[in-house]
Amino acid sequence: MEALLLKNFLRSKGLMTGLLILFVAGLISLNIGKHFLDKNKEIIEKTAHYQQESIAKNVEFHPKEIGLLLYYVRFGLVNEMPNLAGLAIGQRDINPSLKSVTIRNLEEQKYATDLMNPMYQMLGNMDFSFVLIYFFPLIIIAFCFNLISEEKEEGTWSLVLSQSGNPIKMLRIKILIRFVSVFLILVLLLMIAKFYLAIPFDAVFLAFILTSILYIIFWFTLAWLVASFHKNSSQNALILLLSWVTLTIVVPAGVNALTVNLYPVPEAFSTVLESRDGYHNKWDVPKEPTVAKFHQHYPQFSQFKHPEGKDYSWLWYYAMQQMGDDEAAKDALAFKEKLKKRNAFSSTAGMFFPSIHAQLSLNALSLSDMDNYLNFIEKLESFHEQKRLYFYPKIFTETAVSDENWKKFGLEFYQEKPSLNWLKMLLPLLIISILCVFWAKLKFGKNMMAR
């Protein structure tokens, strides 16, 4: 029986075409991921060169005042991207992995991003996670929607019942053959990705593989459950396709809409507004209160004074810039907390929906999720503060530009390691799959003999 079922499967041109399309789509996604990684590497290399070149030119153009020079000089921080991100690009194509900032007001620079083609942003990147989340289930549906109904509609089901003491075994073999074929395509693509994208075979990649496998297992168990209802082929196909639309499109959109409504972020606008007002309106007020607030923030610089009777000094100017950040600090903190709550809510809700959970898990493993970006922003804040504390004394004492070794200011890197919570990552997919199998067993027990 097993040999006959396998032979029938291999002879089916439609099923073989489906596997071929799935494999080609996977290869295209790997190429897109490789291009994304190469582009990011190129940007980092060019920025490193540009930063040194830009600093050298600004030193040449502004050799007398270090305060004026540092108005222009930018320092870059890179959020290192693991090669695994080529499989799950996630937030990386929206939130840049490199930030170049001056020591001036940070809030206006913090969330600045590149201009992108809106059509390209709408279409997004067809990375491997996209193929896994959206394409694999469609192929599984095409393979499994008529497991039993095909036999009934061709008039062979009665023969199966009469000649087989265990018709369920025959159905298990049919779905197992289909599972093995899709599983092999998945593993083959991941092995190609391992070498093509130079992904290290470590615990993180293993977690990525297991999450992917459990996700396709879920769709096979769902197809097995639908088969247990003994509907006809068109009804099975409709149920499975509606499940696909619900789980991959409707529910994620609904969770996103609910998240936005539960955690609105008016602070996104007010932070920028407070930041700009915080320093723009300081031009029209007395200088002493601004400097006094700066001294409260940095008591270690209290010995530096604004010259009496003068309308301008670098101490006052950078104090004014600092006030922009200080006055926006409350809204900026609230904005970050809201983003963290949004992310936590999405993660919790996703545990009940395999498509959301799988996508979030793959993004987290690839360090292309919102948590990674928020951690990077916090690192950017400390990076910016470090530069301020280093240069403020030099600005206030009017240190000669030539006294500084400007060549030492290259790009700096932030590296994060994925947090591996195996139970949280794998258990939701496993539990939902087991529930589908258990429910299907009950339905098969009730319906098999009756049908």
Image (cartoon, helix red, strand yellow):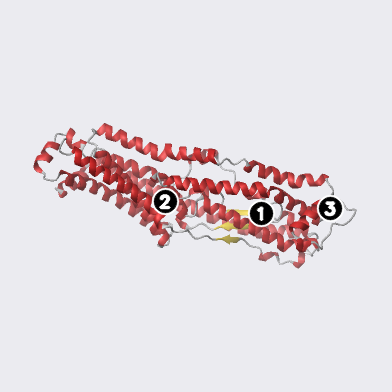
Residue at coordinates 36% horizontally, 39% vertically from top-left?
A: 244
Residue at coordinates 88% horizontally, 53% vertically from top-left?
A: 310
Mark sitting earlier along the chain (2/3): 2
Residue 320 percent across, percent down from the top left: 77, 51
The label on residue 101 is: 1
Quarter of the image with the C terminus in it: top left
Residue 131 percent across, percent down from the top left: 39, 45
For the view shown, which residue lies furthest in the left direction? 163
Residue at coordinates 52% horizontally, 52% vertically from top-left?
A: 371
Provide the secondary structure element on which disc 1 rests: strand
Residue 115 percent across, percent down from the top left: 59, 43
14 versus 321 height, above or below: above
- Mark 2 or mark 3: which is in front? 3
- Mark 2 or mark 1: which is in front? 1
Q: Quadrant of residue 273?
A: top right
- CB within 8 Å, label 2 to label 1: no
- State the residue in front, 333 or 398: 333
| Spatial separation of the CA atoms under disc 2 and disc 1 | 33 Å
Residue 244 visible from this viewpoint: yes
In the displayed structure image, the side of residue 385 where residue 46 appears, left or right:
left
Q: Amino acid at mark 3?
A: Glu
The residue tagged 2 is 30
- State the residue in front, 96 or 297: 297
Would you call the spot at circle 2 few (<14 residues within 10 Å), some (14-19), or many (20 or more)? many
The residue tagged 3 is 288
In the displayed structure image, the side of residue 397 where residue 30 appears, left or right:
left
